[in-house]
Image (cartoon, helix red, strand yellow):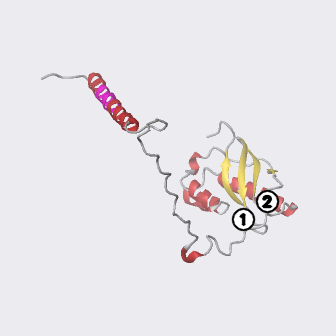
Amino acid sequence: MTHYTASQTRKTFLRASTLGVTAAAVLLCTACFSGDRTGATNEDSPTPEPPPTSTYTPSHSVGGGPQAPDTDVPENPEWTPEAEEAAKEVAVNAMRDFARPEVEETQWANDFARWLTPDATVSYSSVDPANVPVTEVTGPATLEIDEANGFGVIATVPTDIGDYRVQLLRQGQDEPWKVNRLYPPEGAN
């Protein structure tokens, strides 16, 4: 009985695999190029008929109504001094609740979740606060405002390990700001 090393077995398997893939490619290419070729001239061959046109008609919704009936697109919220202050306050408060690695996990998650969007709540639910590298907010937030977008803003919050960037979102003029994502300083875990 012949014994092969792991290296010999892998080489044999790879050769067989390569041979199989090559054979499959040759068969596929042969199938693609068999039969009449486009552009070939043969006076005996009939003129091909044009392909049939589609009879598919896209539907609306069940019952033939529009896809999103009675849907109003909210107006772009305005940037007011109150909106700016509210965004800064949420960014700082969220970072204060985030920057507590010594707090028990359930308490930490509950305190932090009140500032989060539903998507962020799911994303941050698996965070172990003991692994959070930041422990302190060291100054007020500043905002990077895009006047054309009143629904979202990036706040910069200074901390003991550098500036965190906080993405905040709201759904309308009088809706609360919620944290959607935290971006740690470069080089922080």
> In which image quadrant can residue 134 be found?
top right
> In which image quadrant can residue 17 be found?
top left
Q: Which mark is residue 74?
A: none
Check disc 1 and give the amino acid type: Gln
Distance (Cα) linking label 1 and label 2: 9 Å
- Mark 1 element type: loop
Q: Looking at this view, is 3 or 26 the one in front?
A: 26
**Residue 118 x/y as whole percent:** 61, 62
Which residue appears at 79% of the width and 59% of the height? 150
Which residue appears at 60% of the width and 59% of the height? 119
Which residue appears at 47% of the width and 46% of the height? 47
Q: Looking at this view, is 98 or 101 the one in front?
A: 98
By secondary structure, the bulk of the magenta-drawn segment is best described as: helix
Check disc 2 and give the amino acid type: Gly
How many C-alpha atoms fall within 10 Å of the one at disc 2: few (<14), some, or many (≥20)? many
Q: Can residue 104 be seen by looking at this rendering?
A: no
Left or right: 102 in relation to 165 = left
Residue at far right of view = 81
> In which image quadrant can residue 91 be found?
bottom right
Magenta region: which residues?
13-21
Left or right: 176 in relation to 31 = right
In the picture, the quarter occupied by the N terminus is top left
Q: Which mark is residue 150?
A: 2
Which residue appears at 84% of the width and 55% of the height? 147
**Residue 157 x/y as whole percent:** 76, 48
What residue would you read off at disc 1? 171
Task: Answer whether residue 16 is magenta in the image.
Answer: yes
**Residue 20 x/y as whole percent:** 31, 32
**Residue 48 x/y as whole percent:** 46, 47
